[in-house]
Amino acid sequence: MSTTAGTLIVTGGGRGIGAATSRLGARQGYAIAVNYVENGAAASAVVTEIQRGSGRAVAIHADVSNEKEVAALFETAERTLGRVVGLVNNAGITGGFSRLEDLAAPTLERVLAVNVTGAVLCAREAVRRMSNRRGGAGGAIVNISSRAAQLGSAGEWIHYAVSKGAIDTLTIGLAREVAGEGIRVNAVAPGLVETDIHAAAGEPARPQRMAAGIPLGRAAKPEEIAEAVLWLLSPAAAYITGSILAVSGGR
């Protein structure tokens, strides 16, 4: 496998949608920076899989809510793999299930720090490197939003939905800001997906419980979300920016 497409940074790239995106990106010719914050073993496993397929990848630890660590993530990715041409803002947490009246302030603060501050900081670093106004050669950013931003997630995780609403705003605003600088910015808004995010929130069987409410009758596979992400990164989506693509089985 040749890696001629440039370097793609995938935050939270070791598990779920991030891991599927990392694998598919490698198959499509990107060198992959697999970011992680806690599960280094999972990130390393993705890197090993990519390397066995003759791709280039490296696992890089960074808490995306930490400004210095985000800068180091991008610097390490460029130094190790080459010019950054794409960013997938995938790292995120739900903060667990809670009615709003029972939500603890520290939980809210952490959700917003990872899901919103982290995405903004990573997007900022990507723009600094990719903008042709700053000497870059352009590129693309895909933010991972959620259908929760429109549905609200009442009774489960309104706090998470709020953070994903902010991702939609970031996508639209930044797309318009850098459209003339060679950078496209879009988002994918998954619906229910079979990942361990549900178990981490305390309900592993949530996809099965909610499947009946999805017009297509099932939760998505992470690989199906990754296909949409890589399409938005690709030249096939060259005239698309500021869009939020729902990949939700009709929900």
Image (cartoon, rainbow, N blue to C red):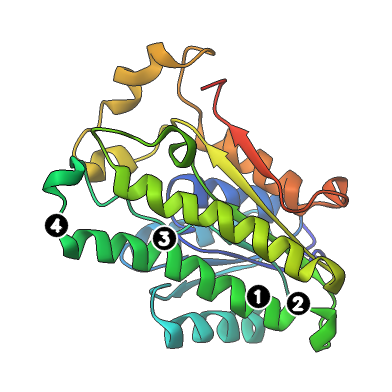
Task: Provide residue 142's location: percent of width, then percent of height.
Answer: 64, 55
Depicted 63 relative to depicted 161: above or below: below
Q: Residues within 10 Å of mark 3 (few under 14, many from 20)?
A: many
Q: Quadrant of residue 171?
A: bottom right
Tell which circle, 1 or 4, labels the residue nearer the N-terminal end: 4
Q: Could one spot residue 49 in this view of the protein?
A: no
Using the image, tell me which numbered label, if any, was put on residue 126. Answer: 1
Label 2: element kind: helix
Tell which circle, 2 or 4, labels the residue nearer the N-terminal end: 4
Tag nearer the camera, 2 or 4? 4
Q: Pointer 2 and pointer 4: residues touching (CB < 8 Å)?
A: no
Depicted 110 relative to depicted 190: above or below: below
Which residue matches tag 3? 115
Q: Residue at x 34, y 35 (%)?
A: 153
| Residue type marked 2 | Met
Q: Pointer 2 and pointer 1: residues touching (CB < 8 Å)?
A: yes
Q: Residues within 10 Å of mark 4 (few under 14, many from 20)?
A: few
Q: Pointer 3 and pointer 1: residues touching (CB < 8 Å)?
A: no
Q: Residues within 10 Å of mark 2 (few under 14, many from 20)?
A: many
Label 3: element kind: helix
Left or right relative to 180: residue 43? left
